[in-house]
Amino acid sequence: MSHDDHHGVMIPAPGPEFVAHEVAHHFSTPVQEFQAGKLGFWLFLATEILLFGGLFAAYFYFHEVFPETFRVGGQQLDWRLGALNTSVLLLSSWTMAMGVRSAQTSQKSKTMIYLVLTVLGALGFMVIKFIEYSAKNEHGLIVFSELFSGYDEVTGQVAWFKDYHGVMKDVAHGHMFFAIYLTMTAIHGLHVIIGAIAIIYVLYGTSKGRYHAGYYLPVDLAGLYWHLVDLIWIFLFPLLYLVP
Amino acid sequence: MTTNTPAVDVQTTQPKAPRENYLNCTTSFKSWALTLDHKRIGLMYLIGTSLAFLAGGVFALLVRLHLWEPEGMLFSNPTYNQIFTLHGAFMVFLFVIPAIPGSLGNIVMPLMVGAKDVALPKLNLLSFYLWVIGAVMAVAAIVMGGFDTGWTFYAPYSLYTDQAVVTIGLAIFVLGFSSIFTGLNFIVTVHKLRAPGMTWFRMPLFVWAIYATAILQVLATPVLGITVLLVAFERLYNVGIFDPRLGGDPVLFEHFFWFYSHPAVYIMVLPAFGIISELVTVHSRKPLFGYKLIAFSSIAIAIISFLVWGHHMFTSGQSTYAMFAFSFLTFFVAIPTAIKEFSWVATVWKGSVALNSPMLYTLAFLIIFAIGGLTGVILGALNVDLHLHDTYFVVAHFHYVMMGSIALAFFAGLHHWWPKMFGIMYNEFQAKIACALIFIGFNATFLPQFVMGSRGMPRRYATYVPEYADYHKASTIGAMILGTGVALMVFYLVASLFIRKKAKQNQWGGVTLDWMCPTPPPHLNFDEEPQVVHEVYDYTTLDYETLQRDCD
Amino acid sequence: MSDHTSTGDGHAPGELDMGHHHVSSPAMFLSVLLALLFLTFITVVVAQFDFGSANMLIAMGIASIKASLVIAFFMHLKYDTAINKLVFMSSFLFLSLLFIFTLGDLFTRRLDHELHTTKSPVDLEWSHPSTLDGDH
Ligand SMILES: [Cu+2]
């Protein structure tokens, strides 16, 4: 290599509002850096699929063992809120895709607008999720204050499952549906938060002019992560709210 | 580069001034703690995983000492449960899984493909620190009262015991992500950072093995992550899916656990295969017999290993049909594995074998792995396994693979690349003695376990009926010999760092790229980007001058 | 595995051509969004009717179509390198192995009961978690 004084290749900035990008020293070309980042991130997304896959396998397993529990449990969730949240996530996925596109075409202010909209989508999703959790809390289906209070050997019930209105009294192990609902949506919600933080990070970088047609990898990767969050919800929505 | 054509265009003649290399280019504590150099990260892994190995080894010796007497010598029964759990958890999660990819993989693999570093150096450092955090959490779990579930954390016992299962569960979650990020990094490195001319079929087999391992690390480990997370959740808020009191099914836990942990056997053993593939060719100075077969068999093993996990659950209450399928599929793993063993033996056959210490460890591996592999086939047979399940036969089988094969291959690789890593040689005579002690001690420890296992001695028991006393005594004596051998090895390896007997530029006469860069390698590995023009393991290209010349 | 290997891909250092970059048109993104919202609507409508055991199949079928749209267009995988496609798709392949064997075990435990007709009822209860459920 001719330019090997510990400095990488420079990608020039396309305009005065942008800054140039220096390719990391162990890469020879910008393409190599870009493709390495993408391949690494796709591999990471594959691990996320398998991580959630374990939860989905548990869902299908117990849906098969206790079909009535899942049917009645699913009816306790408000599918309207679920559908609303699905739409919010789909819209934010669209704004994210447009944000990446704007970065690809060096449109700084447009990128920032789309990224802000995406973060607002994440926020909206979490607010609606909070409303849903509160409703579950009120009906005693998931009593959050007693979440870690354990299991009562005598009644054979877990402490956080009170079922004030007795909606699950006719089915076996009524808490099971809500345990799976809580676990899956909470881990998904955590991903929403992580995704939002990632988007805020690239939003900051965009404001500094770091991302443009020559180098937009971080925006692209934050976008991929956000679409994965959407992807998982696409399956969670019918499985939890519309239990077939 | 006067007498022979080197495999690559690399400057091998340097001025005699003390050369700058990755060890001495910077010296501050920070330059090590925050290094992005794959070789330094590899060395830190080497130190960390070796300490975990020694800790796990001490627990093993305690277990063996306790079993000297039928009623147990040292511990109460609950303490014994904790000690063997610690032995298993430390050895599996802190040593065997991360050791070879983390240390030798990190140091050697980028050199072998002719790269300046791994593709994602910051992620590499993160992997290491995740390992450290996982190790600290594991130690914290001991301080918090220990854990007694066995390294397998089977539900429902792991849900009910009053010990630090949540802490060690989360530790394993963190260690899992350390392993995932290492694998991810290596896949990207192999795909994107190979030097010009380094085609897929010019890659050394160690690279192929590390690559196949990385596929498993990325695809299998997340399921372990969610499994230990769910165990922690069960204990925290009674999810119920593994807890039979709440309608859950412990068999589901075993499915999840072994979906990872069978492929994990290959996460552990494939890098060992890779080391052996390298060493048999270098120390026989003969191209590998069946290069492509070995390369493809690594990938085949990686894929087939996802189809057989149920062979750990033949007595757990799976359906009979599932057991048929899992037993049947298990036999297919034997095919690519046997291909490797045959290829190695055929490589050594009529080669000009140099019986130096790395090769002695390699030969020990070939013998021990043949036994470990074949007893695995025996256990894969459904009807035989019903008799041998959870006996010392199983214990002996997996120690023949884990300790006898993987740890020995790790030692072999360590002796092989030690002069490359540090530019110094250890005491070869002491190395041969240690190798002999380890080989004898290992077999003395575990051969009796095959016998007592087939006669019904169950694993994990703190006490036993007196009929088994002789086997246990033989096994304990063997463990002491094994421990002495390992102690001697640690001694002369550490001592070599102080004696500083200079190694040769190309100590063993390797022709892969790791021996083409200066010894020890400079910070950016190669003085000039290597251009690969020769096929792999082409010993006609060996530059004999580098075998004679002291390293810089 | 025809991905680029290192510097051998013919790009001079500093060259701004970033290889396989595809910039999708806003119209395309908008139509994908509308298709996704429409399919969400369909899922909800279909869920009001009972198709028996086909319910799950229909719901998962629609979800898979939606997922494919997100993956192919929003995530650009349609225009990405072969290796990236292989990586992401293989995660679903290996996940399906977890599903097939785990659920396969569960489903065939029923058949076990027919296979072992000589077993006592106590054995049967021990072997199947669904016997804990009073519903069937
Ligand atoms: Cu196995």
Image: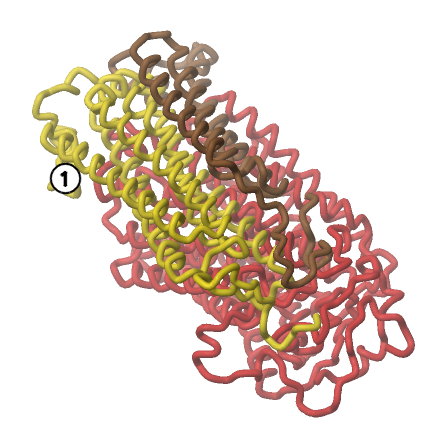
Q: Position of residue A230 (x, y in %)?
A: 38, 36
Measured as percent of width and height from the top left, residue B438 is found at: 61, 65
Which residue is at the far right?
B3
Question: What shade has chain B been given?
Answer: red
The answer to which quarter of the image holds residue B40 is: bottom right
Q: Is residue A5 above or below residue B59?
A: below
How many residues crowd mark 1 within 10 Å: few (<14), some (14–19), many (20+)?
A: some
Q: Is residue C84 left or right of residue B314?
A: right
For this view, does B138 lie left or right of residue C97?
A: left
Quarter of the image for the N terminus of chain B: give it.
Answer: bottom right
Residue B270 point in image, percent of width and height? 62, 51
Chain given the colour yellow: A
Residue B405, picture quadrant: bottom right
**Location of residue B499 with respect to B483 vertically, above or below:** below
At x 54% / y 38%, what residue is drawn? C77
User: Viewer-proximal residue, B165 or B38?
Assistant: B38
**Closer to us: B323 or C73:** C73
- To which residue does mark 1 refer? A144
Q: In what element is the residue under mark 1?
A: helix
For the view shown, which residue lies furthest in the front direction? A16
- Which quadrant contains ligand 1? top right
Chain identifier matching the brown colour in the rendered picture? C
Residue shown at 8%/25% (left/top)? A164
The three-letter code of the residue at mark 1 reads Phe
Image coordinates of residue B125 in percent, x first then y, are 47, 65
In screen coordinates, is B531 left or right of B120? Answer: right
Q: Is residue B536 visible?
A: yes
Q: Chain of mark 1?
A: A
